[in-house]
Image (spheres, helix red, strand yellow):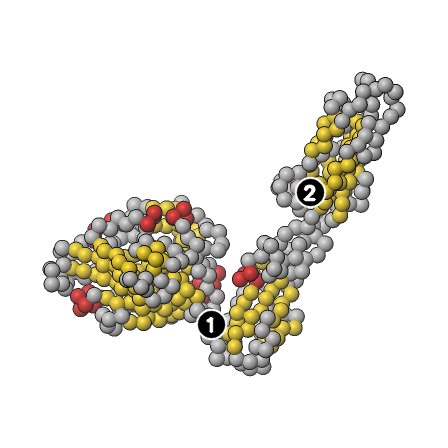
């Protein structure tokens, strides 16, 4: 079976002008002619993987306008039938284009040599085995590559763990780093941590053993200004806030972000949606977002309009909880309902009712004090799906390990409409201090 690769190219490593004749004699006094031999492909070079082969159409033009024929000088590497070139295996493919000569022109031939490179590959799956107790039970490793070739596993921390084949042995408390690589073959390039196209974190897994905890992964470490964290954006599309009854500020040390929603009266539907804000993950920019007219009904007014390429957001592995420090204003804390929601929007994109949608998780948190408090919100025991985008059978652990956290949204379950401050204003205030991280 043959298949046509539309984005295939052969790199010409030698163009031997006139090789094989260069207008070779036979017609005394005939005019010389030349051949222009076009590269038969455009794009990145690939070779078909047996039983498939790559094909292309050869093109060459003689200055005399006469018909050009093609022959393969390396029939074990590439074959020619008419103007169709078939790549059979890796190596140097040599093809000669010939014009036999006529109408007063001497015959001419031109040879071209091409390099036939290997296929690239990527890692498809490298499941994290999770935290491991320090015992003698072996840990089975697995990884899948697009080539379907077997993975090679290596321990980069031999004092903590060793690897033989696809089996990991635990040796001591600590963080075991295992690398999954693929060494390639005659048809595929290797995919190693040092490869040009490799994304190292996709090939590496840090596995905590015994007393070692999972690594801290930071969604944000601090605040540049009211529109930006050190890692990403704050707010809505274009970082422009529609909220004209709220106030945002950042402390002088850029460690605290304060968001305050204010109303002159007990909040109505319009104001309810204003007691919320969102922060976007590392790597996201305005172009990743699209605005929708949803703020009047309290729904999220910024969405992701398409699947986003990696690396965007924060990719979790075995981190089990979200950590942050938050304070409320005393009036809101003293109200009957002072709970707040934390919502995580993931990189799992799907169309729902013909509209863009991202899977989301939500946890409702009950504060214990108005003052700054450290919160730990377990991913599996506190969060539930708030949006499944029409998908069924979703598992929280698989979602957070399989898709990055693109956005975190904080919102009041019920804004303060009971306890006015000294200025007779109803305020709902969030004050975040320090990093937001997962561990």
Instruction: Reply above or below: 272 against 82.
Output: below
Q: Tag 1, which secondary structure? A: loop
Q: Which residue is mark 2?
A: 11
Q: Quadrant of residue 344?
A: bottom left
Residue sitting nearer the eye, 192 or 381: 192
Question: Could you tell me how far apart the alpha carbons at marks 1 and 2 are, in whole angstroms?
Answer: 46 Å
How crowded is the residue under tag 2: few (<14 C-alpha within 10 Å), some, or many (20+)? some
Q: Quadrant of residue 277?
A: bottom left
Q: Quadrant of residue 255?
A: bottom left
Residue sitting nearer the eye, 241 or 393: 241
How crowded is the residue under tag 1: few (<14 C-alpha within 10 Å), some, or many (20+)? many
From the viewer's perspective, is 200 left or right of 391?
right
Question: In the rendering, which numbered label is found on residue 214?
Answer: 1
Instruction: Reply above or below: 394 against 84.
Output: below
From the viewer's perspective, is 267 left or right of 100?
left
Front tag of 1 and 2: 2
Q: Tag 2, which secondary structure? A: strand
Q: Where residue 62 sits in the image (x, y, percent)?
A: 74, 26
Can residue 148 be seen from the camera position used here? no
Q: Where residue 252 sits in the image (x, y, percent)?
A: 29, 62
Residue at (71% x, 41% y) in the render: 12
Q: Quadrant of the C terminus?
A: bottom left
Residue at (87% x, 21% y) in the render: 27
First of labels 1, 2 by sequence position: 2
Residue at (85% x, 19% y) in the render: 29
């Amino acid at each position: 079976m043959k298949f046509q690769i539309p984005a295939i190219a052969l790199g010409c490593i030698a163009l031997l002008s006139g090789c094989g004749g260069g207008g070779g004699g036979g017609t005394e006094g005939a005019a010389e002619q030349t051949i222009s031999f076009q590269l038969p492909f455009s794009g990145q070079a690939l070779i078909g993987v047996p039983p498939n082969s790559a094909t292309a159409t050869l093109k060459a033009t003689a200055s005399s306008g006469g018909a050009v024929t093609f022959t393969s000088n390396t029939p074990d590497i590439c074959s020619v039938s008419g103007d169709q070139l078939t790549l059979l295996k890796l190596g140097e493919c040599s093809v000669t284009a010939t014009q036999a000569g006529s109408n007063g022109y001497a015959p001419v031939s031109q040879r071209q040599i091409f390099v036939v490179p290997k296929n690239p590959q990527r890692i498809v799956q490298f499941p994290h085995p999770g935290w491991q107790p320090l015992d003698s039970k072996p840990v089975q490793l697995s990884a899948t590559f697009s080539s379907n070739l077997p993975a090679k596993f290596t321990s980069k921390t031999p004092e903590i763990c060793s690897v033989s084949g696809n089996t990991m042995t635990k040796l001591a408390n600590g963080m075991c780093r295992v690398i999954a690589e693929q060494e390639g073959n005659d048809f595929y390039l290797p995919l190693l941590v040092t490869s040009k196209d490799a994304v190292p974190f996709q090939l590496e897994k840090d596995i905590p053993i015994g007393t070692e905890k999972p690594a801290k992964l930071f969604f944000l470490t601090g605040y540049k200004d009211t529109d930006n964290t050190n890692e990403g954006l704050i707010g809505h599309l274009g970082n422009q806030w529609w909220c004209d009854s709220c106030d945002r500020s950042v402390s002088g040390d850029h460690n605290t972000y304060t968001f305050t929603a204010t109303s002159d009266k007990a909040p109505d539907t319009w104001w309810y949606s204003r007691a919320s804000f969102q922060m976007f993950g590392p790597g996201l920019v305005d172009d990743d977002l699209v605005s929708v007219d949803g703020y009047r009904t309290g729904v999220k007014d910024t969405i992701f309009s398409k699947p986003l390429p990696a690396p965007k957001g924060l990719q979790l592995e075995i981190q089990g909880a979200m950590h942050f420090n938050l304070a409320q204003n005393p009036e809101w804390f003293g109200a009957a309902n002072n709970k707040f929601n934390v919502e995580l929007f993931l990189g799992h994109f799907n169309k729902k009712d013909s509209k863009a949608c991202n899977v989301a998780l939500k946890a409702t948190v009950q504060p214990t004090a108005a003052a700054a408090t450290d919160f730990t919100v377990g991913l599996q025991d506190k969060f539930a799906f708030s949006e499944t985008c029409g998908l069924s059978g979703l598992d929280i652990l698989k979602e957070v390990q399989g898709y990055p956290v693109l956005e975190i949204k904080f919102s009041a379950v019920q804004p303060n409409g009971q306890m006015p401050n000294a200025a007779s204003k109803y305020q709902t205030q969030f004050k975040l201090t320090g990093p937001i991280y997962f561990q």
